[in-house]
Image: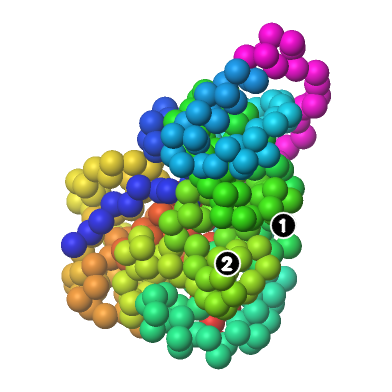
Amino acid sequence: MLRFFRPIHALAALAGTALFGQPQMPMAEIDSAQMGQGKIASAEQAVPISTALAFKGYVQLLAARARQDGVSEATIAAMTSGLTLNPKVIALDRSQPGTSRSNVVPPVAPYLRSHVNGARIARGRMKYAEIAGQASRLEQAYGVPLPIVLAIWGHETDYGGEKGSFDLARSLATLAFEGRRRELFADEFVAVLKMADRGLPRSQLVGSWAGAVGNPQFLPSMYLRLAVDDDGDGQANIWSSTPDTIASIANYFHDAGWRSGQPWGVRAIVPSGFDRTKLATRLRPPSCSRVHGRHDRWLTVGEWRQLGIMPQGPIDDAILASLFEPDGPGTPAWLITSNYRVILHYNCSNYYALSVGLLADAIAP
């Protein structure tokens, strides 16, 4: 049975989907990890006194919310004392491509060249060689192949090289105050205080401008729910522990419905003159409709074969799949499965999901 997933990952929340109450906006399919990387002019300009006072009052409302949720007074005081608005975070949020109403969808090929490149593949293979002994145990525990996990890690932080340096409490309070997705970020602010209440130091609670943290770039609420202490040291350390990082990502995918033994997708050959007029899907996803709407109907692989679509990799004829031609007829095509949709659950962008799948294929021995 097909599932439509609500994107709950840190960066997926930025993609303009109807998530956690934020307004839905049309978006060109761009990797949300790239959002806001352009230069932001005068990002650290002085905040007007009236705004600063309003922010200070709003932080007290957030503190009350955290108190109601059981966060200790000591933690609330430590995490909110002297907290100031971060204009750079607001500028980055307002500059993200997801806020554009453009209907232009750029070609996928340049994106794949830059994200599934030789350096990233090589580092992924090195990581795989280092921890190959854990692959079997990981798949037994979560049903998720190690190359997929490593591909996510590679995409999110270049295997831990770029985790971000924004103070999470300040960023999340700022984004909640801004109001465009107030409930989402107010909840995440309380979640980061809960992380501090567990004993995580403020110095560790840093990450992306949008509140994503650690090697897998989890939102704080996802850390609290899905991060795993795999090395048994008493802490789910997604910052510097490789076992905890890979187990946490695998746990996320398991929770999202990854189907063991099924590929994310395979390349497919589409015959010349193939009639696509009857392939449009009639399914309507509850979120991320612009991304899911680019996929054709769901048929079994066997049925696709009967229509002349030939998969170029191992895939069972009974598996349900959709034909995806990101750059249109006559360009590379894939038969994608429900596991592709699990990758979309992590970040709802076809560019992201396709590049993760291809990177995982390149990493696999």
Q: Which label is found at residue 162?
A: 1
Q: Give residue 218's position: percent from left, percent from top.
A: 54, 54
Is 165 left or right of 220, judged from the image as shown? Answer: right
Q: Main secondary structure of the magenta part?
A: loop
Q: Residue at x 49, y 35 (%)?
A: 67
Asked where in the image residue 113 lies, by quadrant, the reply is bottom right
Q: Residue at x 44, y 39 (%)?
A: 69
Residue 7 painted magenta: no
Asked where in the image residue 337 lies, by quadrant, the reply is bottom left
> Does residue 135 sit above or below 218 in this rendering?
below
Q: In this orientation, which residue lies closer to the viewer: 203 or 180?
A: 203
Q: In this figure, which residue is indicated by the disc labeled 2? A: 235
The span picked out in magenta is 29-54
Q: Give residue 297's position: percent from left, percent from top.
A: 24, 55
Residue 40 painted magenta: yes
Q: Amino acid at mark 1?
A: Glu
